[in-house]
Image (cartoon, rainbow, N blue to C red):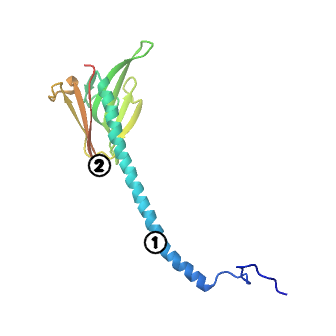
Amino acid sequence: MRRANPIGHRDRQAGFTLVEVLVCLAIMGLIAPVLANTLTVGWRTTDATVSSLSDSRNRALTPSLFTRDVQNAVSVDTLVSDATCTTAGDTLLVRLRWTETAVSGTATSRAVSWVLTSGGDRLLERRWCAAGTSVTSSVTTAHGVVGTPTVTCTSLAGATVACGSATRVSLAVTDTSGAFTASGSRRAS
């Protein structure tokens, strides 16, 4: 005696028919290129977004830190012979120094060197020294730097002067997206 089938179920327990497999393959043939194209566009968009965010970071971080360093500076120099706050292979752009006095009354010398690193991905770095000549910390402020950034030191009147007597210091940087400038005016002299 045969059992009754619930509605929509087949009598046999077999797999798919040849027609069903062919229809499935045809549908997959239409869907697969669309999915592949969508993934490719997504990856390209992600790469462009990451690059854009990096460039935006360069343009925000560099001026912020550089302006603060110049405002604090009691002395400004570009002396390559002085190894304060640099490491081997750096191209020194400018060094800024000041003294901070702690709540306890202890005075501490500070130095910041803005350098261009050598190597594949040319980086603009801010090297900070709490005391002495060794690097305490380093922050990369720009990636993919093109050429060598230039430092311009000017007087209050705007005339180009030696950095030691400058009132205003500017750092011009070019990266893969274009040029930008960070500058600041010294509070101390």
**Is residue 107 positioned above or below 161 on the image?**
above
Secondary structure beneath disc 2? loop
Q: Quick one: label 1, few (<14), some, or many (20+) residues within 10 Å?
A: few
Label for residue 149? none
Q: Amino acid at mark 2?
A: Ser
Mark 1 to mark 2 CA distance (whole Å) = 33 Å
As drawn, 155 above or below 118: above
- In the image, 151 versus 24, the foreground residue is 24
Q: Which residue is mark 2?
A: 177
Residue placed most toward the observer, 67 or 128: 67
The residue most toward the top is 105
* 109 and 167: which is toward the camera: 167
- Check the image and name the residue furthest to the front: 7
| Pointer 1 residue | 33
Q: Are marks 1 and 2 in contact (CB under 8 Å)?
A: no
Relative image position of residue 38 (x, y in whole percent):
45, 65
